[in-house]
Amino acid sequence: MNYESNFKSETIDSIQSDYDLSGQTEHPSRLKWIIAATVLIVALLAALYVFLTSGDAAREGAGDDRSQAPSVTVIAPGRTEMTGSLVATGTLAARREMPVGVVGEGGRVVSVPVEQGQWVKAGQVLASIDRSVQSQQARSAEAQIEVATADADLAQANLDRSLQLVERGFVSKAQVDQLTATRDAARARVAVTRAQYNELLARNARLNIIAPAAGLLLERNVEPGQTVSAGSGTLFRIAKGGELELNAQVGDSELVRLSVGRPAKVQPVGSDDVFEGQIWQIEPFIDERTRQGTVRIALPYSPELRPGGFATAEISSGVVNAPMLPESAILSDQEGSFVYIVDKDNKARRRRVETGLVTDIGIAIASGLDGTEQVVLRAGGFLSDGESVSPQLQQK
C-alpha cells in the first residue's frame, strides 16, 4: 500500500510539473501577439476616425461661418421728390400791436365808451377825461383874441387917418411910422392870442384818448372815475387791422430751410380748426440760451385765434429731390448721423449722412447717399463696421 501510494503521488507530481512548464513557455508568447495585434487595430481605427471627423468638422465649420452671418433687410432708396415740412410751436399775438395811453396832462376819466373785443375806427374816442377847467381857459383865450383883434382894428384906423393928413402937413412922417408900428404890434398880438387859443384847443383834444388806427381792441385797463396821467402806462391795446400772427420758435439748424412767403397751417391748442397762414418775417437773431429763432406767421382774424394762446404750426419747407429713408435706418452718435450700407462683398459699412426734410413717409438724406446703395433698414445698431451679413432686399 505504501508503494502504490508513493507511486501515485510521484506520478501526479510529475504530471503537474509538466503542465506548469508548458504553460510558462507557450501561453505568454501567444497572448503577447494577440494584445499587440489588438492595439494596432485600435490605433488604426482611431487614426481613421480622427482623419474623417476632422475633415467633416472643417467642412461643417466653413458652412457654419456662412450660416451664422446675420440676415438683414436692406433697401435701395433711389431718389424721391418731396415737399418737406417741420412742426413748430409758439404763441399767438397781434401782428402789429398798438399800446395806447395818456398823451396829454391827464385828469379824471369821465367815460370809457368801448369794450375789449370790439372793433374801433381810427380817431374813435376810447376814453374821455374831465375838461371843465380847460374849457374855461379856452374861452378866456378866445376872448383875448377878440380884444387883440379890436386893438388891431383901432390901430389900423388911426394909421389910415394919419396917412390922409400927411399930404396936408398936419402929421409928420415920424408920427406915421409910429402909428404903423402900433398897428403891426396889434396884429402880432392877435396872432399870439390866436395861437394860444389853438394850443388850448389842442390840449383839450388830447384829453380824449383816441384810437390811432382801426383795429381790434384787445385790452381795456381803465374805468370811469379813475385818475390818469402820462405815467399811468398803457390803458388800451389794439391789434392794428385785426391782423394776428404766430410767433413760432424754430431751431437754428432748421431756420436755414425756411424763407418769407412759405405757407403754414396753424392749429390752436384745444381746437380742431386749422388756419392757413404764411411766414411774413424771420427775426434776424437767435436766442443764445435756447438756440432758437422766431418765425412770424401772419394769420387772418378769427374769433378762435386769441392773442396769448398757444398753437402749433406745420410749416412747408420746400421741395427737394433726395434719397428717402425711414427713421429706423438712421442712427446717430457723438459724431452725427450715419447708416449702414452693404457692399459687394456683403460687408456692413458705416456711412456718415446729413439729414434733411422730415416728411410723413420718411427723412430725406441731404448728403452721404446717392440712392443706389443697399441700406440696412433696421437693427443697424447691432452691427459693426466690416461685419459679414446676409442681405435681404426689400422693395420700396
Image (tube, rainbow, N blue to C red):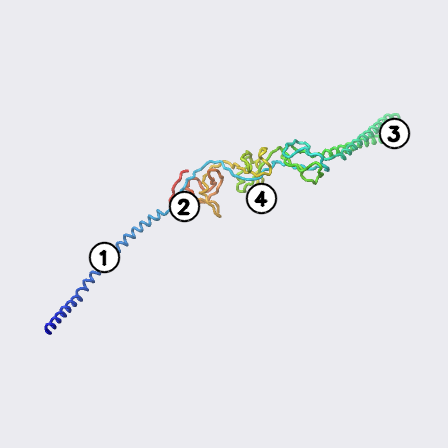
Closer to the observer: label 2 or label 1? Answer: 1
Tell me whether circle 2 and circle 1 mark residues in contact (CB < 8 Å): no
- Disc 2 from disc 4: Cα separation: 41 Å
Among numbered discs 1 and 4, the one appearing first in the sequence: 1
Identify which amino acid the numbered label 1 is placed on: Ile
Identify which amino acid the numbered label 3 is placed on: Ser
**Which residue is depicted at the point 27% across and 54% down?**
49
Q: Residues within 10 Å of mark 1 (few under 14, many from 20)?
A: few
Answer whether residue 333 is visible to the viewer in this image: yes
Q: Which residue is mark 4?
A: 287
The quarter of the picture where the C terminus appears is top left
**Which residue is depicted at the point 25% across and 55% down?**
45
Q: Which residue is mark 1?
A: 41
Identify which amino acid the numbered label 2 is placed on: Ala
Q: Is residue 352 left or right of residue 148?
A: left
Q: Residues within 10 Å of mark 3 (few under 14, many from 20)?
A: some
Among numbered discs 2 and 4, the one appearing first in the sequence: 4
Q: Position of residue 256 (x, y in %)?
A: 53, 40
- Residue that sits furthest to the bottom in the current view: 2
- Disc 2 from disc 3: Cα separation: 121 Å
Instruction: Tell me the quarter of the picture where residue 146 sits.
Output: top right
Closer to the observer: label 3 or label 1? Answer: 1
- Disc 3 from disc 4: Cα separation: 83 Å
- Per the rendering, the mark at residue 172 is 3
Q: Position of residue 172 (x, y in %)?
A: 87, 29
Identify which amino acid the numbered label 4 is placed on: Asp
Q: Position of residue 78 (x, y in %)?
A: 43, 38
The quarter of the picture where the N terminus appears is bottom left
- Considering the numbered disc 4 on the image, is that residue within a helix, a strand or a loop? loop
- Disc 3 from disc 1: Cα separation: 171 Å
Q: Nearer the viewer, residue 138 or 262?
A: 138
Among numbered discs 2 and 3, the one appearing first in the sequence: 3
